[in-house]
Structure formats: C-alpha cells, structure tokens
C-alpha cells in the first residue's frame, strides 16, 4: 500500500494550546480516511498543516512525496481542499468563480469550459450558473465548493465537515460522490466529520483525535472489536414470560450496564460480548422460556467513540 500522506511526530501549538501533539499517521492511496474527534481536537489544524497553510513546530510531513512547506504549489496542484468555511467570491456568479479558479489551478485553457460546465451540471448548479454566489444557500455553496475542489482533478481530496449544513438528500449525494471518487477513480479522500454514521458508512479507516493526540486508528470494524467490549441484544419471548426471563438473566449476571429497556415488545440489553449470545439463549431455553427472537447488534463507531471517551469528560 502506498502512503500518500505521511506525518511523523508532528506538533503544532498556538500560544498555550497544543493543537496537535506528536502526531504520526499514514493515509494510503485510494482510501477514504475519516478524522474524528471533539471540537478543538486538532482536526482542522492537521488539515492545514498537511496542506502547507500552517507550519509545524516539529515533525515531518510528506504529501505525495512533497514537503508542504517548501513545495506547496506542486502539492496543491494535485490536492483539493474543502474547508469548514469555503470562501467564494460573493460578488461573482458560480460560473465566474469556477472559471477563475480553473485558471488559478492551471486547467488547460481548451478544457476550462467543458470542465466547468460539467461540474456545474454534476452538482446541479447549471440553472444557477449565472447567479451571484451571494444569493446561494449553504448547501448550494457547499456544492459549488465541491465543484471548485474537483476542477483540477486532484489525487487527494481533503474535506472538512463536508456535509454539515446539508439537507439529507444533498448529504447523500456527497456520500455517493466520495465513494465514487475513491472506488471508481482511485482518489484518496481525507474527511473530517462529527457525523459518526457518515464515517461508519464511508470510511475504510478512521483516526480518533483527542486534545491534539491520536487515540485510535483502524477500520470501523477493527476499532469496534478492539475498544467495545459489549454489544446490544434484542430479545423477544412469550410476553407472559418476560418478567421471568428478566429475573433469570439478572440472576445469571447476563445483564451489564444497567437495566434492560422495553423495545418493540421485547427486551433490549447490553451483554458482555459475542459469547453472551449462545449463553443467554441456552440459559433461557433450559429454564423453559419460549424465545421467539434473539439478535445482537454489532458495535459501531458511535460505540467506539463513546468507549474511547468514557470517563474522560469533566
Ligand atoms: N489560528 C489559530 N490561533 C489560535 N488557536 C488556534 C488556531 N487554530 C486552532 N486553534 C486552536 O487549536 C485547537 C484545535 O483547533 P482545530 O480547529 O484544529 O480543532 P478541530 O478538531 O478542527 O475542531 P472542530 O471540530 O470544532 O472543527 C483549538 O483549541 C483551537 O482553539
Ligand atoms: Mg475543525
């Protein structure tokens, strides 16, 4: 696997705040990499360091082999960024914004027109192409930012919270686009998000940051099996036996993390792990409980996120 982004022991502070602390990380070509963490964890700072907008106090960064500090222009010719607050020229139309940027990015003259109109169409902005950006909604701006970031067909795309402020439909379009870019076009996508469902669905691997430090990295599945010890079990019994089932489970110590809740006519409770499933089933059946349904929910990134941060809140 080829590492297209490499950080080695990278640190950056702002006055008293250590925004990024000794960060070592690799992102591989063609993967969708998620960057998670609380507000202020250092995600945006990392993106800015990697893009050469900020300078690291310590450590080494390479993007496509380039040093962002000394080879910024070469690097930016092959990467695209969508920041938290994408700045467009509000006085200009969508078409003009893209045309100007195409020029800045060095898109060959002969291709500018087709590429710009192709992207406007792809992001459903063709009808608004001649409207000033000042009149655009948040979602339209975000779509325009995507179009702009893709003008020069970058190998790596950095997305800082790309779906915040988007309606569910537009968010889903972003998801399909990201998947398409990575799977069909083999581009690398580095995405900061607070949306754990989004990260779970999209990302091949994720990193979790906390106070500028990396606390975990791996695929959502790997992280779930490494950090989440429990899983949720849904159990449906003969309704007349529900109370007895509960007593049996409690007596056997099968319930962890508090009392079960009633859900969809059945019980829902936390169990210690996969092995709890056959144990629970045989326990109940042996005691004469009629089990109609038993299912386990594999832990997801949300469980990982809370397991990693458990006990660390003030
Ligand atoms: N230009 C700056 N000047 C001073 N402090 C900064 C600057 N940029 C970031 N910081 C501080 O660095 C820390 C990390 O900020 P950063 O923007 O990287 O967080 P984040 O993980 O992107 O958070 P969010 O989820 O809220 O976007 C914060 O404490 C922030 O206040
Ligand atoms: Mg941020």
Image: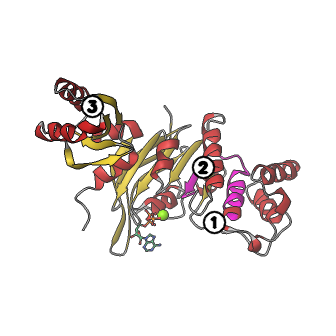
For residue 274, which numbered disc appears in the image? Answer: 3
For residue 6, which numbered disc appears in the image? Answer: none
Disc 1 target residue? 86
- Residue at the extreme front of the image, as rendered: 240
The quadrant of the picture occupied by the C terminus is bottom left
Q: Is residue 39 something that shows in the picture?
A: yes
Which one is earlier in the sequence, the residue at label 1 or at label 3? Answer: 1
Say which quarter of the image contains residue 148.
bottom right
Q: How many marks?
A: 3
In the rendered image, the vertical position of residue 174 relative to residue 181, given as above or below: below
Apparent side of residue 182 relative to residue 14 in the rendered image (left or right): right
In the rendered image, the vertical position of residue 313 relative to residue 179, given as above or below: below
Q: Is residue 9 something that shows in the picture?
A: no
Q: How far apart are marks 1 and 2 (CA)?
A: 14 Å
Say which quarter of the image contains residue 155.
top right
Residue 311 is situated, as x and y percent measured from the top left of the image, at 22, 58
Q: Which secondary structure, mark 1?
A: loop
Residue 83 is situated, as x and y percent measured from the top left of the image, at 58, 62
Local crowd size for mark 1, using a 10 Å CA cut-off: few (<14), some (14–19), many (≥20) = some
- Cβ of mark 3 under 8 A from ligand 1: no
Disc 2 target residue? 157
Q: Which secondary structure, mark 3?
A: loop
Apparent side of residue 106 relative to residue 235 in the rendered image (left or right): right
Local crowd size for mark 2, using a 10 Å CA cut-off: few (<14), some (14–19), many (≥20) = many
Comparing labels 1 and 3, the label whose residue is closer to the camera: 3
Local crowd size for mark 3, using a 10 Å CA cut-off: few (<14), some (14–19), many (≥20) = some
Apparent side of residue 169 relative to residue 210 in the rendered image (left or right): right
Which one is earlier in the sequence, the residue at label 2 or at label 3? Answer: 2
**In the image, which residues are magenta?**
141-162
Which one is earlier in the sequence, the residue at label 1 or at label 2? Answer: 1
Q: How far apart are marks 2 and 3 (CA)?
A: 38 Å
- The foreground one among 252 and 219 is 252
């Amino acid at each position: 696997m080829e590492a297209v982004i490499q950080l080695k022991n990278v640190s950056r502070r702002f006055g008293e705040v250590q925004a990024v602390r000794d960060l070592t990380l690799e992102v591989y070509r063609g993967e969708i990499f998620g960057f998670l963490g609380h507000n202020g964890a250092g995600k945006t700072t990392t993106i800015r360091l990697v893009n050469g907008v900020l300078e690291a106090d310590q450590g080494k960064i390479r993007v496509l082999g380039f040093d962002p500090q000394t080879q910024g222009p070469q690097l930016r010719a092959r990467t695209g960024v969508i920041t938290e607050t994408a700045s467009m020229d509000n006085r200009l139309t969508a078409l003009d914004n893209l045309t100007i940027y195409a020029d800045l990015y060095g898109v060959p003259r002969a291709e500018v027109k087709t590429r710009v109109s192709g992207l406007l169409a792809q992001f459903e902005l063709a009808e608004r192409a001649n409207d000033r950006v000042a009149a655009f909604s948040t979602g339209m701006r975000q779509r325009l930012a995507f179009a702009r970031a893709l003008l020069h067909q970058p190998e790596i795309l950095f997305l800082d919270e790309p779906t915040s402020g988007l309606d569910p439909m537009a968010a889903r379009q972003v998801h399909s686009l990201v998947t398409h870019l990575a799977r069909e076009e083999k581009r690398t996508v580095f995405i900061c998000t607070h949306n754990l469902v989004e990260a779970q669905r999209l990302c091949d691997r994720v990193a979790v940051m906390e106070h500028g430090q990396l606390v975990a990295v791996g695929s959502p599945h790997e992280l779930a099996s490494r950090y989440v010890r429990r899983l949720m079990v849904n159990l449906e019994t003969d309704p007349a036996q529900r109370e007895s089932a509960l007593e049996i489970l409690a007596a056997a110590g099968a319930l962890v993390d508090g009392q079960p809740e009633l859900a969809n006519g059945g019980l829902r409770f936390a169990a210690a792990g996969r092995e709890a499933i056959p144990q629970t089933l045989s326990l109940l059946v042996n005691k004469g409980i009629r089990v109609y349904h038993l299912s386990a929910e594999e832990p997801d990134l949300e469980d990982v996120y809370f397991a990693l941060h458990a006990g660390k809140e003030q």
